[in-house]
Image (spheres, rainbow, N blue to C red):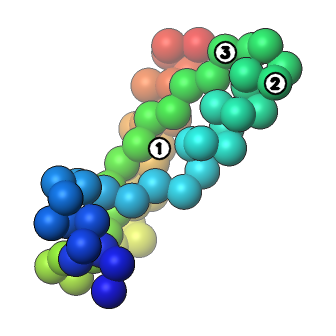
Amino acid sequence: DDYKNWADHGVLCVEMETAGLYTIAAKHKVKALAILTISDSLVTGIATSPEERESSFNDMVEIALNIA
């Protein structure tokens, strides 16, 4: 399991999309912002319920829209 090796090196979370977002933004010389939330733990196996995800994601969208 790769996550155990990453955790041994101090990695706290895994994220997949932001690098692509920033790469495309840099190519087109536009600003980009990522607001991230942790929904599941690879270490403990604890997962956020669909209802909790929807609520927290809606909150993040509100924050992003207010920043923009």
Q: If you read the primary sequence from the N terminus, does the residue marked by circle 3 or circle 1 appear first? A: 3
Q: Which residue is mark 2?
A: 27
Q: Amino acid at mark 1?
A: Asn
Q: Dot 1: within a 10 Å radius of its alpha carbon, few (fewer than 14), some, or many (20 or more) residues?
A: few
Residue 20, position in %: x, y?
Answer: 68, 44
Q: Position of residue 1 (x, y in %)?
A: 32, 86
Position of 56 with respect to 18 (left or right) is: left
Picture disc at residue 31:
3
The percent coordinates of residue 19 (x first, y second) are: 59, 42
Q: Toward which corner of the image does residue 8 lie, by quadrant?
A: bottom left
Q: Give SS at disc 2.
A: helix
Residue hosting label 1: 58
Secondary structure at badge 3 equals: loop
- Of residue 35 and residue 66, the one placed in the foreground of this image is 35
Q: Which residue does the image show at 55% across and 25% down from the upper left? A: 33
Q: Is residue 48 visible?
A: no
Q: Are marks 3 and 1 in contact (CB under 8 Å)?
A: no
Front of the two marks 2 and 1 = 2
Q: Are marks 2 and 1 in contact (CB under 8 Å)?
A: no
Q: Residue at x 64, y 31 (%)?
A: 22
